[in-house]
Image: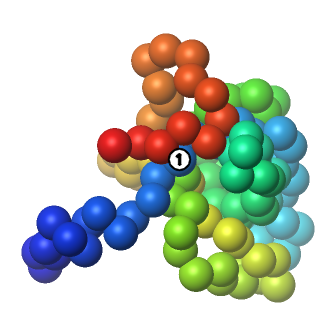
Amino acid sequence: MNITFEEFKKIEIRIGKVLSLEKIETADKLLKLQVDFGAFGQRQIVSGIAQSFTPEELVGKKLPFIVNLEPRKFKGEESQGMLMAIDANEKTVLLEPAGDVEEGTLVV
């Protein structure tokens, strides 16, 4: 399904720094991340990447997140955005900036 360029422009993607995360005990695949978006504040993001990464691998990473989605609950935990990643043959691959960027930077 195609979307118009005007619809695409509504998607707000910003770089966030993972501050902490924990596994959601009632779900095999879900991690609850606390993410810093600089001047835009901190948010809780729930992501289905628990089988691909440990907390130690993710804390401190700067990653792209969609930040203007309506909040949604997963296993009772509210997610205030979505981590952008690649599903490569059932293996999750993270997208990371090639250089150091500030938290909250808009991806264009």
Give the left or right position of residue 22, taking residue 74 as reference. Answer: right
- Point 86% across, 43% down: residue: 20
Q: Please tell me whether residue 22 is drawn above or below residue 2 in the rendered image.
A: above
Q: Please tell me whether residue 108 is drawn above or below residue 58 in the rendered image.
A: below
Residue 45 falls in image quadrant = bottom right
Query: Circle 1: is it few (<14), some (14-19), or many (20+) Cα within 10 Å?
Result: many
Give the left or right position of residue 7, taking residue 95 as reference. Answer: left
Dot 1: element: strand
Where's residue 88, x and y in %?
Answer: 35, 44
The kind of residue on which mark 1 rests is Arg
Where's residue 64, x and y in %?
Answer: 52, 44
| Residue under pointer 1 | 14
Q: Is residue 31 visible?
A: no
Where's residue 84, x and y in %?
Answer: 47, 51
Where's residue 27, x and y in %?
Answer: 76, 72
- Point 53% across, 69% down: residue: 68
- Point 57% across, 16% down: residue: 100
Q: Is residue 15 visible?
A: yes
Residue 46 falls in image quadrant = bottom right
Can you name the residue that lies furthest to the top here? 99
